[in-house]
Amino acid sequence: MGLFDKKYCDICGEKIGLLGNRKLSDGNMCKDCARLLSPWFSERKQSTVEEIKGQLAYREANRDIVRTFHASRSYGEGTKLLIDDAQGLFLIARTNSLVDENPDVVALRDIISVSGGCDEHRMQHHDPNEQPGQPPRYEYSYDFKIVINVNHPYFDDMRFNLNRSSIKTGEVRPGDPIPMTGMNGAGPRPGAGIVHAAPSAGPRPGAPVTAAGPRPGAPGRPAMAGPRPGTPTPGGRPNTVAGPRPGVAAGPRPGAPAPGRPQPAPAPTAPMPPHVDFRGMEEYEVYSQMMAEVVNALTPGVGWQ
Ligand SMILES: [Zn+2]
């Protein structure tokens, strides 16, 4: 069997072009057929031709359900969660042409659990007035993600961001020392202006979001907790750093302070103007709220019956 043997798609029978092969456990599939699979499906290589044919039949039947889907609620920008309350169905769509996109329609009763989380990212901030030896400062941005665990024959979870692009709050603050061991123990900084909105047992920023499910005894608890960004802090510095924060592992950490290097004591200066973009803070607030609403809307026994 030579390197240049022509392969044929075991699904549609078409010749597979160079680099166009999508391997199955017992055959081959072309790119065009692969595009028809569920976007949440991740086990293609372990699937047989028969299993893939079964999924493609399900996907075409799904398109008929999409035609009958009438959204009564919608959440998110870009990627949207749509709920059809009358039929007890939901879907997650990336475009506005639902029938062409054919997003998997899932029954609300097939939701096992839902969780929301906020990922923090940072980029080094370059200040022209920076003093040499000053610890690096970072600009922070945030993504609000939702993870829905479902009972479904072709996938286990659906995850997406409510925001279209990362939300920049304009917050600029020094980085925190990198702990040499472990990645645990993060969580909201005491005294910090930003508390990551997360439902019960929510994920740490930067950590993979795991679905925690509804917390027994606390149905319908809103995901917001603690002070929210945009809440004015006395002194006009919403994000005053309150000591090192252990264990945050969000994004790349270029230029972290070298351990052991003596840090010059900060010179007394005039109060810093707040480095806060109020529109960004507002956006952060809106998405925190939306994340809480989505978690409630999809929590069995809370947002639907
Ligand atoms: Zn094909």
Image (cartoon, grey):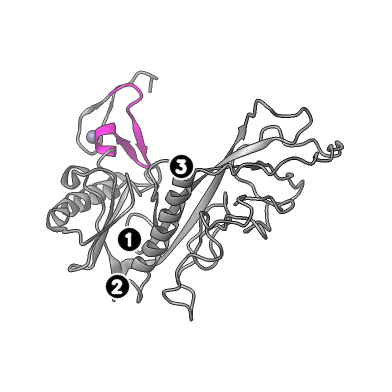
Q: Measured from the top left, where is residue 199 in percent x and y?
A: 49, 65
**Ligand 1 found in image quarter:** top left
Q: CA distance from mark 1 to mark 3?
A: 30 Å
Residue nearest the viewer, comparing 59 with 5: 59
Q: Is mark 1 within 8 Å of ligand 1?
A: no
Q: Residue furthest bottom?
A: 217
Q: Pointer 2: what residue? A: 304
Q: Which residues are magenta?
A: 17-34
State the CA–CA distance, disc 3 to disc 2.
30 Å
Q: Position of residue 201 (x, y in %)?
A: 55, 66
Q: Earlier in the sequence, mark 3 or mark 2?
A: 3
Q: Earlier in the sequence, mark 2 or mark 1?
A: 1
Which one is earlier in the sequence, the residue at label 1 or at label 3?
A: 1
Name the residue: 20% across, 29% down.
14
Mark 1 — residue? 152
Closer to the camera: disc 1 or disc 3? 3
Q: Secondary structure at mark 3?
A: loop
Q: Which residue is mark 3?
A: 166
Which residue sits furthest front? 270
Q: Is residue 268 above or below residue 290?
A: above
Q: Comparing marks 2 and 1, which lies closer to the viewer?
A: 2
